[in-house]
Image (tube, grey):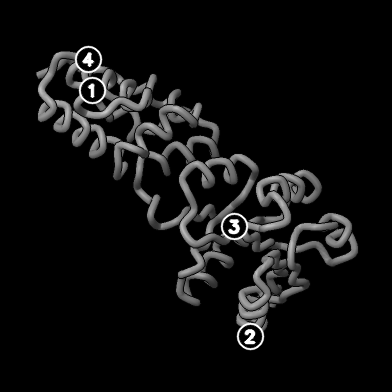
Amino acid sequence: MKKIHILIIEDNRLLRDGISDMLKKQEDIKVIAALGNGENLLSIMANLKLADVVLLDLGLRSKNSLEIAKAIKNDYEKTKIVVMDLIPAQSDVYQFVQAGVSGFILKDATINEFLKTIRLVSQGVQVLPLNLTGSLFSQIVEHALIKSEPSKLMESIRMTKRERQVIELIAFGLTNKEIAEKIHLSPFTVKSHVHNILEKLTLHTRVQIAKYANNTKDYNDVMKSIPLIEEE
């Protein structure tokens, strides 16, 4: 049986030892090293049998996990990386995917979910956090991964001119009341537009709308590509 060789990078010793012990009990998995942080990581990896999968803590205290992921993929392109975090932000997910990360494991995942993610990633499957599966953002990530034309899901979204206007004003930090005054609508109507926007983009809060409209270039690109429809 060909084993999956795992390198663990986790600065919480209790968690690191627990993950290592759990994986060592699996017949198809071999832990080749469990490190506390990313210091001298590449020189250490050079002296180890090349890892198939690296389990990387997203929130390393002493190192930038994103830079570590980039360095690993730069020197070991075929090595798969799985990022571990409690609840990764969508912006973090996108940045790590761009860096070449193959999967994500939530730290409150069950043992079976943990092992399933590792095995799927080792086979070349991309694994996104469950809370993002099926969202517009997951489609953006998939678009980044395959570098193809926008998905049919994106093309199927229809945004009115008023909704686009509301998104832009939310991005500028305006409240519903301020938006209502600026575009001469009632606060109730603006609230209704915000509700529709959240549903169409499968987001949860207006803060998320503002965050990604302001900070994520690819989100803006997708927004610009969404066809407009006339107000009903």
The picture quadrant where one finds residue 11 is bottom right
Estimate how packed mark 3 is, as few (under 14), some (14 to 19) or many (20 or more) residues with alpha carbons within 10 Å.
many
Specify whether residue 28 is in view.
no
Tag 4 near tag 3, CB within 8 Å? no
Residue in the image at 74% along x and 67% along y: 36
Residue in the image at 57% along x and 41% along y: 95
Q: Amino acid at mark 4?
A: Lys
Residue in the image at 71% along x and 45% along y: 67
Frontmost residue, 135 versus 67: 67
Q: Which residue is mark 4?
A: 182
Frontmost residue, 94 versus 6: 94
Q: What is the spatial separation of the Cα atoms under label 3 and label 2, in whole angstroms? A: 21 Å
Q: Amino acid at mark 2?
A: Lys
89 w.r.t. 136: above or below: below
Q: Which residue is mark 3?
A: 83
Badge 2 or badge 1: first in the primary sequence: 2
Frontmost residue, 145 versus 40: 40
Q: Amino acid at mark 3?
A: Val
Horizontal relation, residue 167 to residue 144: left or right:
left
